[in-house]
Image (cartoon, helix red, strand yellow):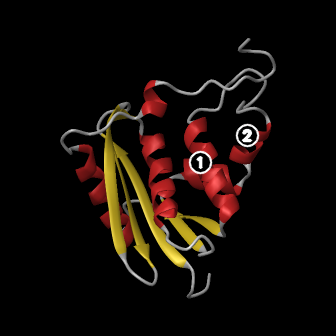
Amino acid sequence: MNNDRIMIYTDGACSGNPGPGGWAAILHGPTNSELSGGFEKTTNNRMELYSAIAAIESLSESDAAATVHSDSRYVVDMINQGHAQRWKQNGWMRDKTHLAQNSDLWDRLLTLCLERDVEFVWVKGHDGHAENERVDQLAVEACTGENLPIDEGFINPPLFPADGLFG
């Protein structure tokens, strides 16, 4: 990691799973910023994914390199170990009989990662890491927001045809 990379710290939270959810991101780069938001009913994994997507989409320069720090093994390992890329290649199937969940968000995240240089780094949650503690606080607060929007991808998950399963 070098000094011209934008450092991103992300977290997601859910009050119940599923339930009201929140996401947050802190960006350290040419300018520093905090982002957060939530959804009326969603899952923790969707909020973890959404936090990374929102942070990367907020970057103004399409060629800016970024390092995403997350305490979500779900996000970090699925990207770094190539599982999400493999699911996409297999028509959003985890294996021959199981659909990959959250394919709408995985597709968005993979597309963003193709458009710029993005690294994913796992950090231990609730371990005194200042940025991780702050994004956790922001994500939890976002769960309690009023008039939270609907998470359409949770309410109406996309069904991708694979191996003739859907028609």
Q: Secondary structure at mark 1?
A: helix
Numbered badge on residue 108: 1
Instruction: Give, as a three-letter code, the residue at label 1.
Output: Arg
Which corner quadrant of the image does residue 144 belong to? top left
Identify the mark at residue 71; answer none if there is no mark. Answer: none
Q: Quadrant of the C terminus?
A: top right
Give coordinates of residue 131: x percent, y percent. 37, 71
> For the point 50% across and 75% down, which residue is it?
7
Q: Residue placed at 21% from the left, 38% from the top?
A: 147
Q: CA distance from mark 2 to mark 1?
A: 11 Å
Outermost residue toward the bottom in this view: 3
67 horizontally vs 131: left or right: right
Where, by quadrant of the figure, is residue 146 drawn?
Answer: top left
The answer to whether 142 is drawn above or below residue 166 in the figure is below
For residue 25, which quarter of the picture?
bottom left
Q: Is residue 3 above or below residue 146?
A: below
Left-right relation of 61 to 155: right
In front of the other: 61 or 80? 61
Residue denoted by label 2: 88
* Three-letter amino acid code at the position of disc 2: Lys
Dot 2: element: helix
**Upstream in sequence: badge 2 or badge 1:** 2
Residue at 64 percent across and 32 percent down: it is 100
Task: Relative to 113, say whether 32 is above or below.
Answer: below
Callout 2 touching callout 1 (CB < 8 Å): no
Q: Give neighbour class at mark 1: few <14, some 14-19, many 20+ (Cα, 10 Å).
A: some
Percent of width and height locating residue 94: 71, 32
Where does the image place residue 46, in percent across and percent down from the top left? 47, 41
